Amino acid sequence: MTSILVRFLANALALAAAVWLVDDITLGKDDPSTGGQVVTLLVVALIFGLVNMIVKPVVKFLSLPVLILTLGLFTLVINALMLMLTGWLAGDAFEVDGFGSAFLGGLIISVVSWAVNMVFDRD
């Protein structure tokens, strides 16, 4: 249970870092208050976690030959596509404008999520 909570919070922090660092990734403009932004970020982190849990393994399996051919670098493209799918599912709450920003955002999310999991996940 603790591991799931740590991963959820790691995703939320990683998404916040991507929103902060990449100009073309924006968090909902409906509620400018800090509390509203935090709630929106947590909802987007939940959507992102579900996309990574359900869709990403299927996409990785179907792209296995390309993953082997590129020695795993195609995973960066898959991460960008998962971020774009999250933006599409979240609607106006989370917007990703273009593949380039999704690619950079996916890279940032991967690094930050890995770092947060390394610091807080002490199993």
Image (cartoon, rainbow, N blue to C red):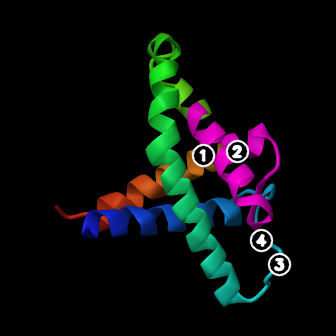
Residue type, numbered disc 1 = Gly
Q: Please tell me which of labels 4 and 1 falls first in the chain.
A: 4
Q: Which residues are magenta?
A: 78-103
| CA distance separating discs 2 and 1 | 6 Å
Taking the image as shown, residue 53 lies to the left or right of residue 5, namely: right
Residue 84 on the magenta segment: yes
Query: Residue 37's x, y, as percent?
Result: 68, 80
Q: Please tell me which of labels 2 and 3 falls first in the chain.
A: 3
Give the camera-side residue of 83 and 14: 83
Residue type, numbered disc 3 = Asp
Decide if residue 14 is in sight here: no
| CA distance separating discs 4 and 1 | 19 Å
The reply to whether callout 2 and callout 1 are in contact (CB within 8 Å) is yes
Label 4: few (<14), some or many (≥20) within 10 Å?
some
Describe the element under mark 3 as helix, strand or loop. loop
What residue is at 77 percent from the left and 71 percent from the top?
28
Q: Which mark is residue 102?
A: 2
Label 3: few (<14), some or many (≥20) within 10 Å?
few
Q: Name the dominant secondary structure of the magenta segment.
A: helix
- Looking at the image, is mark 4 or mark 2 nearer the viewer? 4
| CA distance separating discs 4 and 3 | 6 Å
Describe the element under mark 4 as helix, strand or loop. loop
Query: Residue 87's x, y, as percent?
Result: 71, 53
